Amino acid sequence: MGFFSKIKEGLSKTRDAFLGKVESIITFGRKIDEEFYEELEEALIMADVGVNTVMEIMDELRVEVKKRKLSQAEELRPVLQEKLADLMGSEEQEGLRMAPNDQLTVILFVGVNGVGKTTTIGKLAHKFKSEGKKVILAAGDTFRAGAIEQLEVWGQRAGVDVIKQSAGSDPAAVIYDGLAAARARKADVLLCDTAGRLQNKSNLMDELNKVYRVIKRELPDAPHEVLLVLDATTGQNALQQAKLFGATAGVTGIVLSKLDGTAKGGIVIAIRKELEIPVKFVGLGEKIDDLQPFVPQEFVAALFSGEQEEHE
């Protein structure tokens, strides 16, 4: 199953909520007037597209209506799709940055507890392994009870080694061990878990900075990606987390987990527009292969695709 089919299936809750509402507003024979704009604006906000982003979209739609001399609501449907696609950017921006010339690629994962960070690492390990790469995991979340064991379970499922120390150990020391093991075993990719607590933000960020320094000392070009894992079901709360981590943790990309379980998938658009951080992957289910590289244009196409449509 290709990305379009998977995202279309995974976006069913969001699409039903979003498209159902939009279709009820953009009806045949309805005139474009102020009441129409207000209802459309509300529908977009309810889909968690984000107030600032919605205001910008509405301004652009008003300009296009005048420019193209549109009067009927149904004429606006392709224009809305076009504007959302423009907001998402090009497909080329979204790939993972990898180390050149068969050198070790280091990817650091950050995010609060409960967002699916460990699960995401396990799924990405499986993806890399299925591409023929040698992968090692570093259990840098030494704070949360059960985090190391959870990563080990995913390591077994994906068939990759996990480097760990005891609970409560210095995360930077675990990452250092992971780097040493990855080099010694000639691994292609090292995926590093980190603690997700936010109760004491300064401690968390100090800890992350120490991990950064260790990685930089050993591999000056690493980490090649810092991926922030967010839970799509939390909607605007995910956007707030992204703002917090983006400002302090040097985030280079977003992984949006649990997208299949929410009607708030519009948050992808808000994150892309308001933070200018690309969404690299989306989680579309529980299976080990349900982590999919994110293709912006296909996301928007899937959002607008009714069940009756077939996509070749």
Image: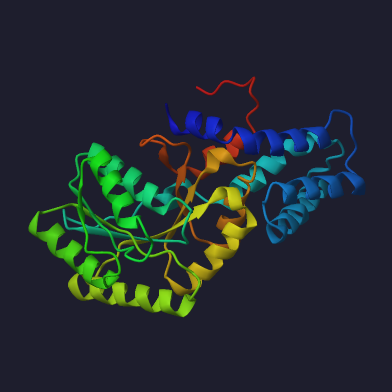
Give the quarter of the image for residue 19: top right
In what quadrant of the picture does the N terminus appear? top left
Q: How far from the left and from the top, in percent, is residue 120?
A: 39, 48
- Above or below: residue 158 compared with residue 271: above
The answer to which of 53 and 267 lies nearer the viewer is 267
Total numbered labels = 0
Q: How far from the left and from the top, in percent, is residue 4?
A: 49, 32
The answer to which of 232 and 58 lies nearer the viewer is 232
Q: How far from the left and from the top, in percent, is residue 283?
A: 46, 42
Whether residue 273 is visible here, answered yes or no, is no
What residue is shown at x 48% (from left), y 31% (from top)? 6
Whether residue 298 is visible here, answered yes or no, is yes
- Above or below: residue 228 compared with residue 245: above
What residue is shown at x 42% (from left), y 48% (from top)? 92
Give the quarter of the image for residue 51: bottom right
Q: How far from the left and from the top, in percent, is residue 79?
A: 71, 41
Taking the image as shown, residue 51 lies to the left or right of residue 210, namely right
- Above or below: residue 219 compared with residue 48: below
Taking the image as shown, residue 89 lies to the left or right of residue 190, namely right
What residue is shown at x 77% (from left), y 45% (from top)? 43
Taking the image as shown, residue 44 lies to the left or right of residue 219, namely right
Taking the image as shown, residue 111 lies to the left or right of residue 17, namely left
What residue is shown at x 37% (from left), y 52% (from top)? 118
